[in-house]
Amino acid sequence: MTPVSHFAQYLLKQDPQRNPARLTLYNFLKHVMEPNLPFTPAVVQAFYARVLQFDHWQNDSQNMSTVVKTDLQNYLSQFALEGEAEAWAHLRHPDSLQIVTLKQTGDLEELIETEHAARQKSGDAIRSVRMNDSQILVLILSPSGSLEAKVYSNMALVWGSRLRLTAPVTQLYYSSDLELMPHVRQVLEGSLLTTHCFHVDVEGVHGLITRGYTFQKFETFIRARLADTQDLFASLKKVERHFINPQSDPYYQEMVTRLERANRLLGVQNHEGLLEAERTLNKGRLILKNVFPNDRLLTLLVTHLDYGINQKRAHPAQ
């Protein structure tokens, strides 16, 4: 069976830049999917289950269907192995799919429970956490201790007489010690219609950010320090705070240490120390707002540092 990368290379030869639907499929396969996965109908169905969450493709589903059908027919006529035609015949394209918004979070929770029932029976422990009014985090703990974290939006596909989940906007894999699994493709929803597709290893974070409904490459990072990736880091912590105790998070511990040191610097009559304390205060405010919101200890340290700096500025001789 041919890999995902093989079909992606075929699309590249069709000049995808000239057609938004083809470009979206190519970018999804190139940037989001694992390239060595077998190219099956499930890959295309997962693509549809993701792109139909964008208003643009909900409104232009006919064009998406026409383009992808044509590309698949041409590709399969050249490369499909004997016996695969029947599987591809059952593929449902966007022009035959309807997407609905689930206004009641409880309905989404029930749908998640139904679709993950088989994994629960196989021994996985599953827990759902409401992240906000429109998203639910699903935590899947395997008997070996590894953890999968998936975030679903409050949308569903009408599939005959029942509903199906749309594709998760975030899918992360952790080892038993709650560290991101090395060399594993991670997908994380970011801000402003961005998606982070990356993996980690001993050298740091490697990957890219896609933007918009075409999954266009926006930014690339190689051997980056996780804490320096800004939106990726903040988006990751927004998910992790639902299942990782901040007290055990090394980035949290680092921020606490910096704030405590900055508070001590205020007791020294040193202009450079004051400037460093102000820089730490600005960093602490950002971390408190975007990464560990409403954390009591960070709130206390930031508030105390802010007060101390104001006092130092008002009474520099003291």
Image (tube, rainbow, N blue to C red):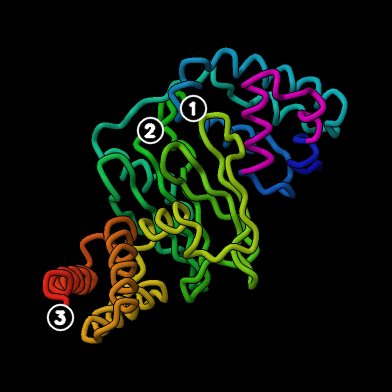
- Visible residue check, residue 120: no
Marked residue nearer the N-terminal end (1 or 3): 1
Q: Residues within 10 Å of mark 3 (few under 14, many from 20)?
A: few
Q: Are marks 2 and 1 in contact (CB under 8 Å)?
A: yes
Q: Are marks 1 and 3 in contact (CB under 8 Å)?
A: no
Residue 22 among magenta residues: yes
Task: Examine the image and state in which quarter residue 81 appears.
Answer: top right
Bounds of the magenta segment? 9-31
Q: Residues within 10 Å of mark 1 (few under 14, many from 20)?
A: many
What residue lies at 56% left-to-right and 13% top-to-bottom? 62
- Visible residue check, residue 60: yes
Q: Which amino acid, by three-letter code, is at mark 2?
A: Met
Q: Which amino acid, by three-letter code, is at mark 1?
A: Leu
**Label ID, residue 80:** none
Task: Examine the image and state in which quarter residue 94 appears.
Answer: top right
Q: Residues within 10 Å of mark 2 (few under 14, many from 20)?
A: many
What residue lies at 17% left-to-right and 74% top-to-bottom? 312
What residue lies at 33% left-to-right and 43% top-to-bottom? 135
Marks 1 and 3 sit apart, C-alpha to C-alpha, by 63 Å
Q: Main secondary structure of the magenta part?
A: helix
Query: Does dot 2 land on a helix, a strand or a loop?
Result: strand
**Label ID, residue 52:** 1
Marks 2 and 1 sit apart, C-alpha to C-alpha, by 9 Å
**Label ID, residue 155:** 2
Q: Which amino acid, by three-letter code, is at mark 3?
A: Ala
Badge 3 is on which residue?
317
Q: Specify the quadrant that holds the C terminus.
A: bottom left
- Name the residue nearer the viewer: 153 or 208: 208
